[in-house]
Amino acid sequence: MAEAKSGKIEVSQTDIAEIRQSVAQLCAKYGEDYWLEMDRSHGYPSDFVAELTQAGFLGVLIPEQYGGSGLGVLEASAVMEEVCKSGAHAGVCHAQMYVMGSVLRHGSDEQKNQYLPKIARGELRLQSFGVTEPTTGTDTTSLKTTARKDGDNYVVNGQKVWISRIEHSDLMLLLARTTDKDKTQKKTEGLSVFIIDVKAAQGNGLEIRPIESMINHHSCELFFDDLVIPSESLLGEEGKGFKVILDGMNAERILIAAECVGDGRYFIDKASSYATERTVFDRPIGQNQGVQFPIARSYTEVEAASLMVEKAAKLFDAGLPCGAEANMAKMLASEASWKAGDVCMQTHGGFAFAKEYHIERKFRETRLYQIAPISTNLILSFVAEHVLDMPRSY
Ligand SMILES: Cc1cc2nc3c(=O)[nH]c(=O)nc-3n(C[C@H](O)[C@H](O)[C@H](O)COP(=O)(O)OP(=O)(O)OC[C@H]3O[C@@H](n4cnc5c(N)ncnc54)[C@H](O)[C@@H]3O)c2cc1C
């Protein structure tokens, strides 16, 4: 491995293959029954997350000076893909990788020194990102949570929804309005990001209510009632928080796309093996083109999505614009993994419904990514407007 001009460590295809192999070995210790049990009990896989952290995989994006590996999104994508390919649910920890990117790019030296080494060592978890609100949804700049300056503090009031992993995180990044929308020149102005100490806030102005949901994603509703946070919690400049979160969103989309590629490969492996083994009418079901063609088509779609993930990751790591590619990768990969899940279900017939086959759990999990962290329609409108120069639709 060599140091690149960007400060990131350059790795070869061989290094990436080694990363994949090590992640796969680690994940093999946590078999599918482990994940089924987590799903059934709504449990949090603390031991898996701790081991992934200790092995350095969740800190791949943290620069070496803060105790991470200093690698890029390309390598981080390989980690996430392997996690998902193993049958695991990466949603329990993926944000640990990319949320810290906002601290890295926009934090003061003090904040970086305070948080990043501890995150790299696994002593602090920063894996919660509080953006979505119940009444405004995708219309982020209309969010209603406010943080009002009060002496040396800010006072936070409002509500968030679907904030994942907060019960298993020490810190959360929170997006709130510091200037009313009608008092700013642009609607993206007047928003600010804060680093919230979750344990200190809970019960002192922050109430956390878990949402019972389709997958084991540990998502919650948050209620802020005069939560007092110190001014030093501000991340980046006051009023410029939209830029702080936008930067991180491209990394998030690429990594989630990589997870979908991993899910897709998981489904295709399962479907092709089962189609080869399962005999009905005295022949393997996979001998029928009606069974094998959908699997082959799905494989082709996942491979194509994987290329877009790689393109987006390489652009991100080179510091080049990658908004369109990150969005397209997320859309293509989430659709490909969902279709692969559907094909895998169909190939398994009735057994697909048996929990012990694990397909239905992964099927539910991969469905999320056509909706979160950004829904497909919003990606299409981004491409239409920003790539194809068509009129803005909203
Ligand atoms: C399990 C889970 C975990 C999540 N984790 C987090 C988290 O950790 N942090 C966080 O901040 N958020 C989180 N979210 C929220 C997620 O990012 C949002 O659900 C997602 O961005 C969609 O927003 P919404 O649900 O408000 O949908 P809405 O904005 O209400 O949209 C509903 C539907 O209408 C469509 N739509 C809306 N406007 C338009 C338009 N102008 N043109 C065309 N179509 C449109 C959308 O595409 C969508 O299909 C999570 C969600 C889930 C389900």
Image (spheres, rainbow, N blue to C red):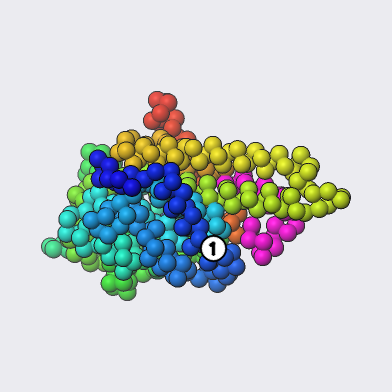
Quarter of the image for residue 250 reads top left
**Image position of 314 (left or right of 38):** left
Residue placed farthest to the right in the image?
281
Q: Which residue is mark 1?
A: 28
Q: Residue at x 38, y 58 (%)?
A: 58
Most extreme residue toward the left, as rendered? 151
> Residue 376 at what x, y percent from top left?
50, 41
Which span of residues is magenta-colored? 337-360
Q: Main secondary structure of the magenta part?
A: helix
Q: Looking at the rendering, in which quadrant would you find the C terminus? A: top left
Q: Is residue 342 magenta?
A: yes
Numbered disc 1: secondary structure: helix
352 w.r.t. 201: above or below: above
The front one of 394 and 94 is 94
Q: Which amino acid type corresponds to the residue marked 1 in the rendered image?
A: Ala
Q: x, y (%) of residue 225?
A: 30, 66
* Residue 171 visible in image: no
Whole-percent x and y of residue 246?
Answer: 32, 44
**Vertical order, 344 against 88 (above or below):** above
Residue at 86% from the left image edge and 51% from the top image edge: 282
Lateral position of residue 270 relative to residue 233, left or right = right
The reply to whether residue 358 is visible in this rendering is yes
Q: Quadrant of residue 393?
A: top left
Residue depicted at x 63% and y 61% = 358
Q: Position of residue 301 (x, y in %)?
A: 58, 38
Tell me the residue at 67%/43% (across/down): 295
Residue 180 belongs to the span the image colors magenta: no
153 vs 66, nearest the viewer: 66
